[in-house]
Image (cartoon, coloured by chain):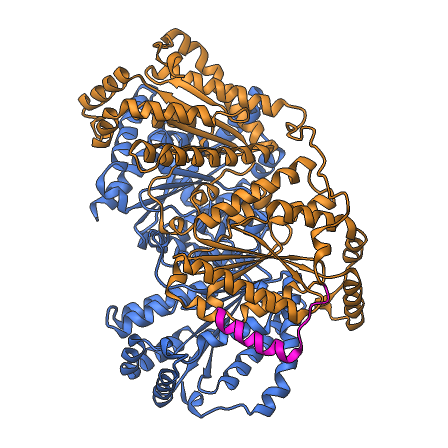
Chain colours: A blue, B orange
């Protein structure tokens, strides 16, 4: 894999002088087109062997283009805000919006690579983590990002030569650290692991480009040209690339026995029982948040359900049990323009709780496979891939000791009609029934299929759906509180 | 000041039962009107004596209203991201947007109060810090926020009674800490300092409401009613309150000797000298960023100037000297909708660098007193108060060891015309001259007055303006680099 990057590639001064001015002009033009069209974000990863010139290359890219629309990130130590959240959080929060360029040195590949070389993680875990990265990058690409990955390579001899020459010059001596020499001693190991990494993460959407690092001019020109070609291709494409390859239809059960139809919608609770149970479970929930172990957890709760199924009321019964300082409720509304310039999941990423806190989502990322699917607000390929992306996201949460509790509040068509009419009669503006509510109701069957597909594809062991029979509000609220308590207790038991 | 809050106020059960349902309904309605109109943000501070029921009160407000549109903040220990930035940063980042309610327990008053009680800061410093808070709150109010401040009071005997009763009940025992008893012993000191604090920070725009804390129902009902009255008054006002009281005109110098006119616009540098100096100062700047002390500083650079004065080119000469990992450039463009829902300064607050980093603003918060003033994009009162708000902001930066370096790049009217024509001739799209550029040019005189007023009012000892004679690009760039080096060197000298 590295053979071609050890041939001693060189660019003569004449070629350099001839080609650079034209390349710079073209890069600047492409960057301006990107900025004005706001078509997509550009994510550039610069990784590779120590002292192969990553920093210099990134500095040059900033010089060749307009640095006002480039942001360079060299993420090292995690801040304590990052430490309390999933591994990818630090990258999520600094992804470039559409129209801009983000350059990463010290990428999401650094940690797994180093940990494997130093023996902290075995090959199996390395592969797992790389697979997650592949998923993440695929999602970025599907969301429209241009992801370019450069690996700067040096042969063993070249690396040694480079370290020595940097050390000799008093001006650059500071750049060579003990760690660099330590890594050099592990050269063969690094080479082997890097090879494995490059191989498994070079995908059609975002392949690696391996660049020989020894001659700076060769390195700069290669990367500059690759960047220009990729930018121009995407900018000049008439349509955004269609990731929607022919997608096989989802096969619904042929006997129409949907999971939602198996719910016993007659379940109910007497008012007096409700009041006892409410006090009991709210008290239990409150105590749980004061458990010493709770500070090592966080809780993400998702409330989805039919219109008028009682999401708001249920959320209130949960928050009544909690200190207001511990929770945030995110009512999912129309995305802001900053959110629209980012991947679909971004507006949820930014609201992930720190340890010891709750985030309650009133509607959630499942909008994609529910309303967006049924109303045709996104492509078929978009909501089909969302199942996997959602599972990936929730897995990351769980791995970070987040308890993910998802409720689907289900009411019957008749009960919904009764509640709609009742609300119209009361006429309270805070329970206004809109035309949209009536329209959604007409698509009851389509929503039902979408909900069942959602449950089939995203109710996982680590983040299961709880289906709540909500014709009776008392029953529903207690089931929700009880489930929440049990899930948190189970998580506390594992600490 | 506390006399009325020691009278033993009480609300009977009958009154409570009669009044609460109506109050809740009215609060919910007001909250919904707020949410839909997005007229202003509501900032509620709940402070006061230990164990006077701050937490319970906030929980009840969340229960009475729709908690989905309230965010409660109890900020305690600073995270390391907050530690690297000005004191108010932690509050800036969580201010509620228009239409939402933010409740703060553990407010910006806590630190100065405690530090004075414990003797860490003297009265003079306490007053200084309170004065800064008054400025901050005044700015919030001027930006349209509704700021409500509640102080929950307990008499010495009542506090003791409350601590004992909480301790007796096994369910609430955990709430009484050693610190609470320690504070109780300092009751008189706390009372005295609180009195001073309440007195100096109770302003017409955001007065304190002192509430006796011993009877929960009295406390809840008082705060609920005060909140409702304030919300309704603002919501029902036909127009947003006009803070533009008659503002005296700014008096320009009567002899037309403006500071800008004293610049020697013929200053220039030979190309060969420029090249030598460029190398010299870029090298010096680069070395400065590798100085050990630099990790304790941060640098905020502001570039303002006439159109075509060469801001972009100058910024590039600065960034060429820097590692791309160390700087961010913020090109100030139209605000996003998230930014529009916040105070004017918010979009700058969010881009304040951490230690060891540069933020370079390509145009800045000075837009308010330049283009917004001249083009009438904000009220006269808005840009007049901006001078003071900007000085406050920059003072906060400097106090946090940020070097604030501000450049005004000045070219003559003739030179601008030459550059506009040249750019039109080249026709490079990245140097496009728009109709707006020509229009701005027609207002040359007005801009000149605005610039001079800006310099007069915001060129401070701690954050002075550097006026750059920019008819000659070489001269301008070197002056900028040299100034930047000198300012950083001076700051390093103080560490």
Q: Position of residue A489 (x, y in %)?
A: 24, 41
- Is A258 on the left-hand or right-hand side of B347? left
Vertical order, B147 against B264 (above or below)? above
Residue A343: where, in percent of width, then height? 52, 56
Q: How many marks?
A: 0
Which image quarter: residue B480?
Answer: bottom right
| Foreground residue among A322 and A272 | A322
Residue at 31% in and 43% down: A356
Residue B248 screen position, x and y as percent? 70, 32
Magenta span contains residue A347: no
Residue B283 seen from this side: yes
Q: Nearer the viewer, residue A444 or A41?
A: A41
Q: Main secondary structure of the magenta part?
A: helix
Looking at this view, name the residue that lies furthest to the front.
Answer: B255
Query: Range of the magenta residues?
Result: B265-285
- From the viewer's perspective, is A418 left or right of A50? right
Of the 4 image quadrants, the one containing the N terminus of chain A is bottom left
Query: Measured along the vertical axis of the image, is residue B147 above or below residue A462?
Result: above
- Position in image of residue A62 (x %, y %): 55, 70
| Residue B269 lies in the magenta stretch | yes
B283, above or below B332, in the image: below
**Quarter-of-image position of residue A440:** top right
Residue drawn at (40%, 36%) of the image: B125
Compared to residue B9, the image places residue A454 above or below, namely below
Rendered residue at 78%/70% (across/down): B422
Image quarter of residue B308: bottom right
Question: Is B13 situated left or right of A137 in this image?
Answer: left
Which residue occupies 80% across, 53% down?
A: B439
> Is residue A244 visible to the viewer in this orientation of the structure?
no
């Amino acid at each position: 894999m590295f053979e071609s990057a050890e041939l001693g590639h060189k660019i003569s001064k004449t070629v350099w002088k001839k080609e650079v001015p034209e390349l710079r002009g073209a890069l600047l033009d492409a960057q301006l087109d990107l900025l004005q069209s706001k078509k997509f974000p550009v994510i550039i990863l610069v990784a590779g062997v120590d002292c192969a010139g990553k920093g210099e290359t990134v500095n040059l890219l900033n010089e060749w283009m307009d640095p006002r629309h480039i942001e360079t990130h060299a993420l090292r130590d995690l801040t304590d805000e990052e430490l309390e959240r999933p591994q990818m959080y630090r990258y999520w929060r600094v992804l470039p919006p559409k129209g801009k360029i983000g350059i990463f040195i010290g990428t999401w590949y650094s940690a797994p690579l180093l940990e494997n070389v130093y023996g902290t993680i075995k090959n199996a875990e390395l592969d797992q983590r790389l697979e997650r990265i592949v998923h993440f990058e695929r999602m970025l690409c599907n969301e429209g990002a241009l992801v370019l990955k450069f690996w700067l390579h040096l042969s063993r001899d070249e690396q040694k030569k480079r370290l020595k020459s940097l050390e000799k010059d008093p001006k650059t001596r500071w750049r060579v650290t003990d760690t660099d020499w330590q890594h050099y001693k592990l050269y063969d190991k690094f080479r082997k692991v890097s090879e494995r990494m490059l191989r498994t993460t070079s995908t059609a959407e975002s392949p690696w480009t391996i660049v020989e690092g020894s001659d700076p001019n060769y390195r700069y020109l290669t990367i500059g040209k690759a960047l220009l070609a990729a930018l121009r291709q995407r900018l000049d494409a008439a349509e955004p690339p269609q990731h929607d390859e022919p997608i096989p239809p989802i096969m619904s059960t042929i006997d129409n026995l949907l999971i939602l139809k198996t719910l016993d919608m007659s379940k109910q609770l007497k008012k007096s029982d409700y009041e006892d149970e409410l006090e009991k479970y709210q008290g239990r929930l409150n105590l749980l948040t004061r458990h010493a172990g709770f500070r090592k957890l966080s809780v993400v709760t998702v409330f989805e359900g039919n219109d008028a199924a009682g999401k708001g009321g249920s959320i209130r019964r949960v928050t009544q049990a909690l200190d207001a300082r511990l929770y945030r409720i995110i009512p999912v509304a129309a995305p802001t323009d900053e959110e629209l310039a980012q991947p679909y999941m971004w507006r949820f990423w930014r609201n992930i709780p720190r340890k010891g806190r709750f985030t309650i989502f009133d509607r959630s990322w499942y909008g994609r496979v529910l309303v967006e699917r049924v109303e045709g607000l996104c492509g078929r390929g978009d909501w089909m891939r969302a199942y996997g992306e959602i599972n990936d996201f929730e897995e990351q949460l769980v791995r970070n000791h987040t308890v993910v509790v998802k409720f689907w509040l289900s009411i019957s068509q008749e009960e919904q009609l009764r509640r709609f009419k009742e609300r119209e009669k009361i006429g309270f503006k805070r329970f206004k029934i809109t035309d949209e509510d009536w329209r959604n109701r007409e698509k009851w069957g389509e929503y039902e299929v979408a909900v069942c597909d959602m449950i089939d594809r995203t109710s996982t062991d680590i983040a299961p759906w709880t289906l709540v029979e909500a014709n009776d509000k008392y029953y529903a609220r207690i089931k929700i509180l009880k489930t929440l308590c049990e899930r948190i207790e189970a998580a506390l038991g594992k600490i």
